[in-house]
Amino acid sequence: MPKEEMEPIASSEGVKIYCPKNGRFSFFNSPYPAHRSCSAIDIYPKNIFGDVAPSPFGGEVTEIRRVKCPFGKGFEGTSHDCVTLFRSLENPERWIKVLHIEPLIKVGDVVELGEELGHLLRSGFFDFWTDPHVHVEVRNPSDSLRASGGFKFERLTDVRNIEPAVENLKGTVVESKPEYSLIALDGVSQHGLPVDVDGHTGLLDAGIPHYGWIGVHMDAPPTLGGTASLCGRKIGIIKSVQSNMGIAECCGLSFALEGKPVRLSLYLWLSSRPLVKVVPQRFGELALKRLEEVSLSIF
């Protein structure tokens, strides 16, 4: 099988991490602490659970450890997850930690960028709306397994010359199923959902409001204490900055669609038109039709 076309999205300690060009990725759209500290990336290839994911780096397999999962939250998940460790080919002094794939490789194998890594697991650690993805961290070999302790990432994807922040959240349903609906918002065509940060435009990367924090990507570091606003509504205050990214604390906002409370799941997209994932409060609660025109409200 030919390798997928990959694009560099982040780097840490001399190690570059790549994403399939037709995929999406997130630094902050997760409840886990490593994402809040800018030391983890989730890569979403355009695949379904059980498909094979391409490797987002080059490395030599050093350890494969299977861990028991909780039962899926409203879905049938796998009984285990996998932690796979690699020695980076770019910087052998650093290891790469991967979660959520059933490896097709064994200890001692060398995997090149874009080669087959493993089958995408529907882990019991996921929520019902979580899509298949590969979780990646760069680690010190002496501290490779803890939930925290990874090296911080810098984003490589260029977010300059993006559209100005949107004035409303209106768009068209492109996909709908019991887990979530995907909305193509009007006025959004590059990389992600634009947000205003003190008069400058950034891109949102977050699960809001359910995770309590909001990731913002800028072409320059945002200012600590700066205000992130969406459709003229304050949604967060910048509390920490890493390179050209900021993390804001949520400001008690809520979203609704057709009068029902919903949650938004937001990512960075490379070549596809960015879509907003709208998540119901309960599985199957939101029934939308493909090509339906909808409007989200903030309150």
Image (cartoon, rainbow, N blue to C red):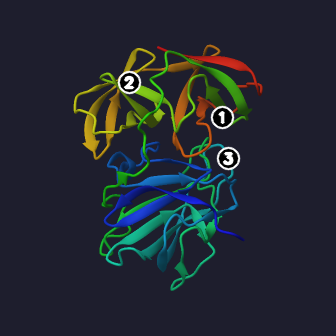
Mark 1–mark 2 Cα distance, whole angstroms, equals 26 Å
- The residue to which callout 3 is attached is 75
Picture coordinates of residue 25, whole percent (x, y):
51, 48
Q: Tell me the amino acid under the disc marked 2.
A: Asp
Q: Earlier in the sequence, mark 3 or mark 2?
A: 3
**Quadrant hosting residue 184:** top right
The reply to whether residue 210 is in sight is: no
Q: Do the CB atoms of the residues marked 3 and 2 lie less than 8 Å apart?
A: no
Residue 182 versus residue 95 in the image, above or below: above
Q: Which residue is mark 1?
A: 180
At x 65%, y 43%, the residue is 74
Q: Nearer the viewer, mark 1 or mark 3?
A: 1
Helix or strand or loop: what does disc 3 sit on? loop
Residue 260, image x and y in percent? 61, 18
Placement of 14 over or under 182, stated as above or below:
below
Q: Quadrant of the N terminus?
A: bottom right
